[in-house]
């Protein structure tokens, strides 16, 4: 029924300060978002390079191992197969027999 006692007229200069404080907090929030975005991008670039290097090294190591074991790669699914296999043991792809053709 009666008006709350603390409902007082807020002076214009205090409203101005409240608006400035709100803007300042919003700017801080925006800056924080930017810092997070930059950090994520830098991490993604750095880790992405490491991952690409590792993937290259792994592919190379696999190839060297396959060569050393005289296995053949399936061109379809990259499964290692015994060099005498006619078809891939994983996907059934007909395997390239170049290596044997050279022997005959
Ligand atoms: Zn295959």
Image: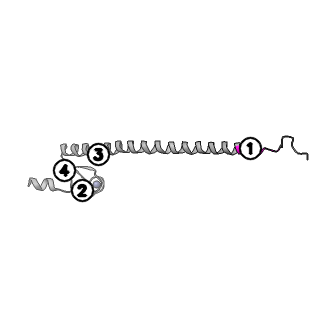
Tell me the quadrant of the picture where the C terminus can be found: bottom left
- According to the image, label 1 marks what residue? 13
* Residue 8 magenta-highlighted: no
Q: CA distance from mark 2 to mark 4?
A: 10 Å
Q: CA distance from mark 4 to mark 1?
A: 86 Å
Pair 2/3: label in front: 3
Looking at the rendering, the stretch of residues picked out in magenta corresponds to: 9-16
Between 40 and 63, the one lying in front of the other is: 40
Q: Could you tell me which secondary element the residue under label 1 belongs to?
A: helix
Q: Could you tell me which secondary element the residue under label 2 belongs to?
A: loop
Binning the other alpha carbons within 10 Å of mark 3 as few (below 14), some (14 to 19) or many (20 upward) gives: few
Is residue 43 toward the left or the right of residue 57 in the image? right
Q: Where residue 54 appears, x then y in whole percent? A: 32, 42
Between 87 and 21, the one lying in front of the other is: 21
Q: Which mark is residue 83?
A: 4
Q: Where residue 102 appears, x then y in whole percent? A: 10, 54
Task: Report the residue at 22% width, 43% height from top.
Answer: 65
- According to the image, label 3 marks what residue? 56
């Amino acid at each position: 029924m009666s008006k709350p006692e603390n409902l007082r007229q807020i002076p214009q200069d205090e409203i101005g300060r409240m608006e400035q404080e709100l803007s300042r907090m919003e700017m801080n929030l925006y800056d924080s978002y930017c810092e997070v975005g930059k950090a994520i991008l830098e991490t993604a670039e750095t880790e992405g390079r490491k991952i690409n290097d590792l993937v290259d090294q792994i592919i190379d190591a696999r190839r060297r191992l396959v060569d050393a074991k005289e296995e053949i790669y399936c061109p379809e699914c990259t499964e290692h197969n015994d060099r005498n296999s006619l078809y891939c043991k994983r996907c059934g792809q007909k395997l390239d027999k170049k290596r044997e053709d050279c022997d005959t």
